[in-house]
Amino acid sequence: MKTVHFSDLGLIDYKQAWDHQEKLFDGVVQTKISNRTKSPDSVIPTSSYLLFCEHPHVYTLGNSGKQEHLLVTEAQLKAKHATYYKINRGGDITYHGPGQIVGYPILDLDNFFTDIHKYLRFLEEMVIRTLAEYGINSGRSAGETGVWLDADNPAKARKICALGVRASRWVTMHGFALNVNADLNYFGNIIPCGIVDKAVTSMQKELGIKVDEKEVKQKLKKHFAELFECELV
Protein backbone atom coordinates (compact mmCIF):
# COMPACT_ATOMS: atom_id res chain seq x y z
CA MET A 1 0.00 0.00 0.00
CA LYS A 2 1.17 3.55 -0.77
CA THR A 3 2.33 5.58 2.22
CA VAL A 4 1.75 9.29 2.78
CA HIS A 5 3.71 11.13 5.47
CA PHE A 6 1.28 12.99 7.74
CA SER A 7 2.15 15.99 9.96
CA ASP A 8 -0.04 18.32 11.98
CA LEU A 9 1.79 21.67 12.08
CA GLY A 10 -0.69 23.19 14.57
CA LEU A 11 -1.18 26.99 14.53
CA ILE A 12 1.43 28.28 12.09
CA ASP A 13 2.03 31.52 10.21
CA TYR A 14 0.79 31.25 6.61
CA LYS A 15 4.15 32.16 5.05
CA GLN A 16 6.00 29.68 7.26
CA ALA A 17 3.63 26.87 6.20
CA TRP A 18 3.89 27.95 2.55
CA ASP A 19 7.71 27.84 2.71
CA HIS A 20 7.53 24.35 4.27
CA GLN A 21 5.17 23.19 1.51
CA GLU A 22 7.44 24.65 -1.20
CA LYS A 23 10.43 22.83 0.26
CA LEU A 24 8.64 19.45 0.25
CA PHE A 25 7.12 20.14 -3.20
CA ASP A 26 10.50 21.11 -4.70
CA GLY A 27 12.08 18.00 -3.19
CA VAL A 28 9.52 15.72 -4.88
CA VAL A 29 9.82 17.55 -8.22
CA GLN A 30 13.65 17.39 -8.13
CA THR A 31 13.53 13.64 -7.41
CA LYS A 32 11.25 13.17 -10.43
CA ILE A 33 13.56 15.21 -12.67
CA SER A 34 16.68 13.30 -11.57
CA ASN A 35 14.87 9.94 -12.01
CA ARG A 36 14.42 10.67 -15.72
CA THR A 37 18.14 10.11 -16.37
CA LYS A 38 18.41 6.97 -14.22
CA SER A 39 18.10 3.32 -15.16
CA PRO A 40 14.86 1.66 -13.92
CA ASP A 41 16.66 -0.19 -11.11
CA SER A 42 18.23 2.99 -9.66
CA VAL A 43 15.08 5.18 -9.67
CA ILE A 44 14.38 6.79 -6.27
CA PRO A 45 10.69 6.53 -5.23
CA THR A 46 9.06 9.91 -4.60
CA SER A 47 7.49 10.76 -1.24
CA SER A 48 3.98 12.12 -0.67
CA TYR A 49 2.82 14.25 2.25
CA LEU A 50 -0.36 15.45 3.95
CA LEU A 51 -0.03 18.51 6.19
CA PHE A 52 -2.77 19.78 8.49
CA CYS A 53 -2.55 23.18 10.15
CA GLU A 54 -4.39 26.25 11.31
CA HIS A 55 -3.38 29.82 10.42
CA PRO A 56 -3.64 33.15 12.23
CA HIS A 57 -6.08 35.47 10.34
CA VAL A 58 -4.88 35.72 6.73
CA TYR A 59 -6.27 36.45 3.25
CA THR A 60 -4.71 34.76 0.22
CA LEU A 61 -5.27 35.62 -3.43
CA GLY A 62 -4.79 32.95 -6.11
CA ASN A 63 -3.50 33.34 -9.67
CA SER A 64 -6.90 33.99 -11.21
CA GLY A 65 -8.06 36.30 -8.42
CA LYS A 66 -8.84 39.99 -8.44
CA GLN A 67 -7.19 42.35 -5.93
CA GLU A 68 -10.48 44.27 -5.61
CA HIS A 69 -12.10 41.19 -4.04
CA LEU A 70 -10.21 42.22 -0.88
CA LEU A 71 -12.58 44.84 0.55
CA VAL A 72 -10.32 46.32 3.26
CA THR A 73 -7.25 48.58 3.28
CA GLU A 74 -3.83 47.70 4.66
CA ALA A 75 -4.58 49.73 7.81
CA GLN A 76 -7.88 47.89 8.32
CA LEU A 77 -6.10 44.54 7.90
CA LYS A 78 -3.66 45.57 10.63
CA ALA A 79 -6.53 46.55 12.94
CA LYS A 80 -8.08 43.10 12.40
CA HIS A 81 -4.70 41.41 13.10
CA ALA A 82 -4.82 39.91 9.60
CA THR A 83 -2.20 39.51 6.88
CA TYR A 84 -2.47 39.22 3.09
CA TYR A 85 -0.54 37.19 0.50
CA LYS A 86 -0.74 36.79 -3.28
CA ILE A 87 0.09 33.15 -3.93
CA ASN A 88 0.71 30.56 -6.66
CA ARG A 89 -2.43 28.41 -6.42
CA GLY A 90 -5.51 28.44 -8.61
CA GLY A 91 -8.64 30.25 -7.52
CA ASP A 92 -9.53 33.69 -6.22
CA ILE A 93 -9.36 35.18 -2.72
CA THR A 94 -10.02 33.23 0.44
CA TYR A 95 -9.67 33.58 4.21
CA HIS A 96 -7.85 31.34 6.67
CA GLY A 97 -7.98 31.67 10.42
CA PRO A 98 -8.30 29.95 13.79
CA GLY A 99 -11.07 27.36 13.95
CA GLN A 100 -10.48 26.30 10.36
CA ILE A 101 -8.74 23.05 9.40
CA VAL A 102 -6.39 23.64 6.49
CA GLY A 103 -5.01 20.63 4.60
CA TYR A 104 -2.08 20.65 2.21
CA PRO A 105 -1.56 17.36 0.32
CA ILE A 106 1.79 17.26 -1.49
CA LEU A 107 1.22 14.17 -3.61
CA ASP A 108 3.05 12.78 -6.62
CA LEU A 109 -0.06 11.92 -8.61
CA ASP A 110 2.04 9.60 -10.80
CA ASN A 111 1.78 7.25 -7.79
CA PHE A 112 -2.02 7.63 -7.59
CA PHE A 113 -3.73 8.76 -10.83
CA THR A 114 -2.83 11.52 -13.28
CA ASP A 115 -6.12 13.41 -13.27
CA ILE A 116 -6.41 16.81 -11.55
CA HIS A 117 -10.21 16.85 -11.91
CA LYS A 118 -10.44 13.50 -10.10
CA TYR A 119 -7.96 14.76 -7.47
CA LEU A 120 -10.16 17.78 -6.68
CA ARG A 121 -13.29 15.62 -6.54
CA PHE A 122 -11.53 13.24 -4.08
CA LEU A 123 -10.64 16.16 -1.76
CA GLU A 124 -14.27 17.31 -1.89
CA GLU A 125 -15.49 13.75 -1.28
CA MET A 126 -13.27 13.42 1.80
CA VAL A 127 -14.96 16.51 3.29
CA ILE A 128 -18.47 15.45 2.19
CA ARG A 129 -18.02 12.05 3.92
CA THR A 130 -16.62 13.72 7.06
CA LEU A 131 -19.54 16.17 7.30
CA ALA A 132 -22.02 13.31 6.79
CA GLU A 133 -20.71 11.76 10.03
CA TYR A 134 -21.99 14.89 11.81
CA GLY A 135 -25.36 14.77 10.07
CA ILE A 136 -24.45 17.65 7.75
CA ASN A 137 -25.69 16.97 4.23
CA SER A 138 -23.27 18.62 1.78
CA GLY A 139 -22.30 18.36 -1.86
CA ARG A 140 -20.87 20.13 -4.89
CA SER A 141 -21.96 23.23 -6.77
CA ALA A 142 -21.95 22.94 -10.58
CA GLY A 143 -18.99 24.75 -12.10
CA GLU A 144 -17.46 25.65 -8.73
CA THR A 145 -14.95 23.88 -6.53
CA GLY A 146 -15.31 23.27 -2.81
CA VAL A 147 -18.03 21.77 -0.63
CA TRP A 148 -21.43 23.41 -0.34
CA LEU A 149 -24.69 23.14 1.57
CA ASP A 150 -27.97 23.58 -0.33
CA ALA A 151 -25.94 24.20 -3.51
CA ASP A 152 -29.01 23.83 -5.74
CA ASN A 153 -30.95 26.53 -3.88
CA PRO A 154 -29.42 29.97 -4.73
CA ALA A 155 -31.24 31.59 -1.81
CA LYS A 156 -29.72 29.17 0.73
CA ALA A 157 -26.44 28.01 -0.90
CA ARG A 158 -23.43 28.38 1.39
CA LYS A 159 -19.85 27.20 1.22
CA ILE A 160 -18.29 25.27 4.10
CA CYS A 161 -14.99 24.22 2.50
CA ALA A 162 -12.81 26.04 -0.06
CA LEU A 163 -10.35 24.37 -2.44
CA GLY A 164 -7.37 25.77 -4.32
CA VAL A 165 -4.49 23.72 -5.65
CA ARG A 166 -1.37 23.98 -7.73
CA ALA A 167 0.20 21.10 -9.66
CA SER A 168 3.43 20.83 -11.60
CA ARG A 169 4.81 17.59 -13.12
CA TRP A 170 1.80 15.91 -11.44
CA VAL A 171 2.98 17.04 -7.98
CA THR A 172 0.33 18.91 -5.97
CA MET A 173 0.45 21.63 -3.32
CA HIS A 174 -1.98 23.95 -1.48
CA GLY A 175 -5.33 22.25 -0.80
CA PHE A 176 -8.50 22.70 1.22
CA ALA A 177 -9.82 24.80 4.11
CA LEU A 178 -12.76 23.48 6.14
CA ASN A 179 -14.63 25.91 8.40
CA VAL A 180 -15.08 24.10 11.70
CA ASN A 181 -15.30 26.78 14.42
CA ALA A 182 -14.04 29.70 12.29
CA ASP A 183 -15.07 33.32 12.93
CA LEU A 184 -17.20 33.87 9.81
CA ASN A 185 -17.18 37.67 10.26
CA TYR A 186 -13.74 37.70 8.62
CA PHE A 187 -15.32 36.53 5.34
CA GLY A 188 -17.17 39.87 5.31
CA ASN A 189 -13.91 41.59 4.32
CA ILE A 190 -13.67 39.77 0.99
CA ILE A 191 -15.74 38.46 -1.90
CA PRO A 192 -14.89 34.83 -1.06
CA CYS A 193 -13.54 32.94 -4.08
CA GLY A 194 -14.89 35.82 -6.20
CA ILE A 195 -18.45 34.54 -5.73
CA VAL A 196 -20.72 37.46 -4.95
CA ASP A 197 -24.11 35.88 -4.29
CA LYS A 198 -23.40 32.98 -1.95
CA ALA A 199 -22.76 32.84 1.79
CA VAL A 200 -20.19 30.92 3.83
CA THR A 201 -20.86 28.72 6.82
CA SER A 202 -19.10 26.52 9.38
CA MET A 203 -19.75 23.24 11.16
CA GLN A 204 -20.27 25.21 14.39
CA LYS A 205 -22.88 27.44 12.74
CA GLU A 206 -24.74 24.48 11.19
CA LEU A 207 -24.73 22.35 14.35
CA GLY A 208 -25.14 25.15 16.88
CA ILE A 209 -22.25 23.84 19.02
CA LYS A 210 -18.47 24.13 19.12
CA VAL A 211 -17.01 21.12 17.32
CA ASP A 212 -14.03 19.03 18.45
CA GLU A 213 -11.40 19.83 15.79
CA LYS A 214 -9.17 16.88 16.77
CA GLU A 215 -12.05 14.52 16.07
CA VAL A 216 -12.76 16.19 12.68
CA LYS A 217 -9.09 15.77 11.74
CA GLN A 218 -9.22 12.03 12.54
CA LYS A 219 -12.29 11.63 10.31
CA LEU A 220 -10.70 13.61 7.46
CA LYS A 221 -7.56 11.44 7.69
CA LYS A 222 -9.64 8.25 7.63
CA HIS A 223 -11.55 9.31 4.50
CA PHE A 224 -8.38 10.60 2.81
CA ALA A 225 -6.68 7.21 3.34
CA GLU A 226 -9.73 5.34 2.01
CA LEU A 227 -10.11 7.48 -1.11
CA PHE A 228 -6.43 7.63 -2.02
CA GLU A 229 -5.91 3.99 -1.00
CA CYS A 230 -2.92 4.86 1.15
CA GLU A 231 -1.63 4.57 4.68
CA LEU A 232 -0.90 7.77 6.63
CA VAL A 233 2.36 7.41 8.57
Image (cartoon, grey):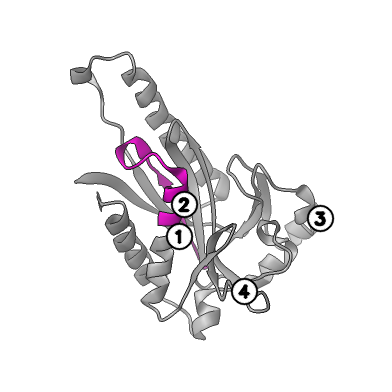
* Label 3: how many Cα within 10 Å (few below 14, some 14–19, many 20+): few
- Which of marks 4 and 2 precedes in the sequence? 2
The reply to whether residue 28 is in sight is yes
Residue that label 1 marks: 124
Q: Are marks 1 and 2 in contact (CB under 8 Å)?
A: yes
Q: Residue 159 sits in which quadrant?
A: bottom right
The reply to whether residue 10 is in sight is no
Residue that label 2 marks: 120
The type of residue carrying mark 1 is Glu
Residue 44 lies in magenta, yes or no? no
What secondary structure is marked by label 4?
A: loop
- Which of marks 2 and 3 precedes in the sequence? 3
Residue 105 lies in magenta, yes or no? yes
Q: Which mark is residue 141?
A: none
Q: Residue at x 60, y 39 (%)?
A: 88
86 relative position to 10: left or right: right
Residue that label 3 marks: 73
Tell me how far mark 3 sits from mark 2, CA to CA: 32 Å
The type of residue carrying mark 3 is Thr
Task: Give x and y (percent) for residue 50.
Answer: 37, 49
What secondary structure is marked by label 1?
A: helix
Residue that label 4 marks: 157
Magenta residues span 98-122
The type of residue carrying mark 2 is Leu
- Of residues 63 and 113, the one nearer the viewer is 113
What secondary structure is marked by label 2?
A: helix
Task: Give x and y (percent) for residue 135.
Answer: 41, 81
93 relative position to 201: left or right: right
* Label 4: how many Cα within 10 Å (few below 14, some 14–19, many 20+): some
Tell me how far mark 1 sits from mark 2, CA to CA: 6 Å
Task: Give x and y (percent) for residue 113.
Answer: 35, 42
